[in-house]
Amino acid sequence: MGLLAARLACLTNTVAILLEWVMARMVLHPRIQSKTQAELDTVVGHDRVISDADVARLPYLQDHLIPTGTTAMVNMWAIAHAPTVWADPSTFRPEQFEEEDVSVLGGDLWLAPFGAGRRVCPGKTLALATVHLWLAQLLHRFRWAPADGGVDLAKRLGMLLEMEKPLMCKPTPRW
């Protein structure tokens, strides 16, 4: 039971950290936040709560699937920021995942946040099932802006790549 509890704690912690980073980017990029919310308005509307079934119809919110590929130990940060792989890698631009045939599943190793091969994160499926839904729910009903003091993207490297300072935002109802 202890090992299962530890793995669940790790999974929920990594999902929370991922959502904090994504929300930080949404706060810093209102155009992208608005584009995501426009997709949510089209698919979900204003009269109901988002369901799991809606997530599959939100392509801007999520990535495209690709087949699995080679297992390798590589510097994923370097690949995710390589100008030979990505156009303007330092810019937060989710549209690149609509323009390129790439997925967070790690099959082609352009992007593999869950690892790949035998050492892939065991919580990958649960994380992908929950992160998109939670992000959609956060963006569906509220506009998000930086709290006083702005957004600090400084990193703290440990077992997980956490934000140095917790994200603080101001939500405003969208309707």
Image: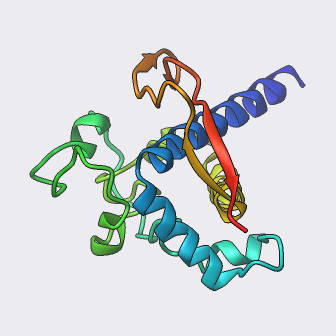
The spot of residue 95 in percent (x, y) is: 34, 67
Residue at the spot 72% in from the left edge and 36% down from the top edge: 12
Residue at the outermost right position: 1
160 or 168: nearer the eye? 168
| 132 over 11 or under it: above or below | below
The spot of residue 143 in percent (x, y) is: 61, 56
Residue at the spot 61% in from the left edge and 37% down from the top edge: 169
19 or 101: nearer the eye? 19
Residue at the spot 43% in from the left edge and 46% down from the top edge: 116
The spot of residue 26 in percent (x, y) is: 49, 50
Residue 74 seen in this snapshot = no
Residue at the spot 52% in from the left edge and 24% down from the top edge: 160
Question: Relative to 102, is 150 on the left or the right?
Answer: right
Question: Relative to 168, is 81 on the left or the right?
Answer: left
Which corner quadrant of the image does residue 23 belong to?
top right
| 107 over 25 or under it: above or below | below
